């Protein structure tokens, strides 16, 4: 079986590994200067931006679904989700700029960004705060 | 000679339809086995893709066209039966991209069935990721690419080894 492997197989194997490593390293190289913010994007729209410093639980409702994002001790995790697969809850805690928690079934993305000036943030900030 | 008789070396259309249906049913069984015994190594959302054995072997031993048709039917049926419309859309995108890549790699004749399967696994995941990025409109999802590439490689290699062993040992008269 080993003998049936071809040169191109091995090349492809290491290309995939290199690509994966490259993308994994990219967000670490981005400078995390300034205040870190937690950005919540629900259904493609930014529904809230919160400083990573302040402990808070945020309820995000979209299309009849509920997620609870918890910011605590400069860490973010998905406290609760009513989605079927619970991938977001199992993601655990994120702390670094560029890291994300995603709940695909409920169209929700939680992202840590570098600073308060995070793109088109001004249209729908702080909709739901608990 | 009528046009319908000129393609007699490929068998009648009834025979082709029956064979495609049989192969699709076989592939569906593999999907079902994976629903019964999910090999997901503790990470939800990641699976082995056992059903890819069928198109792989058909592609190598019979004809890519049968592989494509059987796989398409299998993905639609398995998606609707086991995971719902939403997930079926993801599966469809993943498997179409994956099949295209596997077909092209096989055509170059430079890769073994294991390498082809590995690429298929990776691009299955990347196809799904592309749909997710479009649907959730979140380019941030790109951060999941490393995990998806690695898991696709591992699953693809395991399935590829299985396909290699089976493609070698299945008797030739099965494919006549």
Image (cartoon, coloured by chain):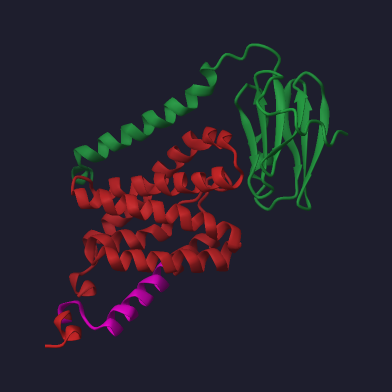
Chain colours: A green, B red
Q: In x, y percent, where is residue B61?
A: 22, 64
Q: In x, y percent, where is residue B64?
A: 27, 63
Q: Quadrant of the N terminus of chain B?
A: bottom left
Most distant residue in the left direction: B1
Q: Quadrant of the C terminus of chain B?
A: bottom left
Q: In x, y percent, where is residue B164?
A: 27, 54
Which residue: 32% across, 65% down?
B67
Q: Main secondary structure of the magenta part?
A: helix
Does residue B140 show up?
yes
Task: Write down the region rendered in magenta.
Answer: B8-27
Q: Is residue A97 magenta?
A: no
Which residue: 66% across, 30% down?
A111
User: In the visual, does B46 lie left or right of B72?
Assistant: right
Residue B2 figure quarter: bottom left
Is B29 in front, or is A18?
A: A18
Is B22 in front, or is A66?
A: A66
């Amino acid at each position: 079986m080993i003998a049936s492997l071809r040169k191109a197989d091995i090349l492809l194997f290491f290309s995939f590994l290199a690509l994966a490593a490259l993308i994994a390293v990219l967000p670490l190289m981005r400078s995390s200067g300034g205040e870190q913010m937690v950005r919540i994007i629900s259904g493609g729209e930014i529904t809230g931006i919160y400083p990573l410093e302040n402990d808070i639980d945020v309820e995000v409702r979209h299309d009849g679904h509920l997620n609870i994002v918890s910011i605590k001790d400069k860490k973010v995790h998905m406290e609760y989700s009513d989605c079927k697969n619970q991938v977001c809850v199992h993601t655990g805690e994120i702390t670094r700029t560029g890291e994300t928690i995603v709940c695909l079934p409920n169209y929700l993305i939680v992202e840590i960004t570098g600073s308060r000036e995070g793109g088109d943030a001004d249209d729908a900030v702080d909709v739901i705060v608990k | 000679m009528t046009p319908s008789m000129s393609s007699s070396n490929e068998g009648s259309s009834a025979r082709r339809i029956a064979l495609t249906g049989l192969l699709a049913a076989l592939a569906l069984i593999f999907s079902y086995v994976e629903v019964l015994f999910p090999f997901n190594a503790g990470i939800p959302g990641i699976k082995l893709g056992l059903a890819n054995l069928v198109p792989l072997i058909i592609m190598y031993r019979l004809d890519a066209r049968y592989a494509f048709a059987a796989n398409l039917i299998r993905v639609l049926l398995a998606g609707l039966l086991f995971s719902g419309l939403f997930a079926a859309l993801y599966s469809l995108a993943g498997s179409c991209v994956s099949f295209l890549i596997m077909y092209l790699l096989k055509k170059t004749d430079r890769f073994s069935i294991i390498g082809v399967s590995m690429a298929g696994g990776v691009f299955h995941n990347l196809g799904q990721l592309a749909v997710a990025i479009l649907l959730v409109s979140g380019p941030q999802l790109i951060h999941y690419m490393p995990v998806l590439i690695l898991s696709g490689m591992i699953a693809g290699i395991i399935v590829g080894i299985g396909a290699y062993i089976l493609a070698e040992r299945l008797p030739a008269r099965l494919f006549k």
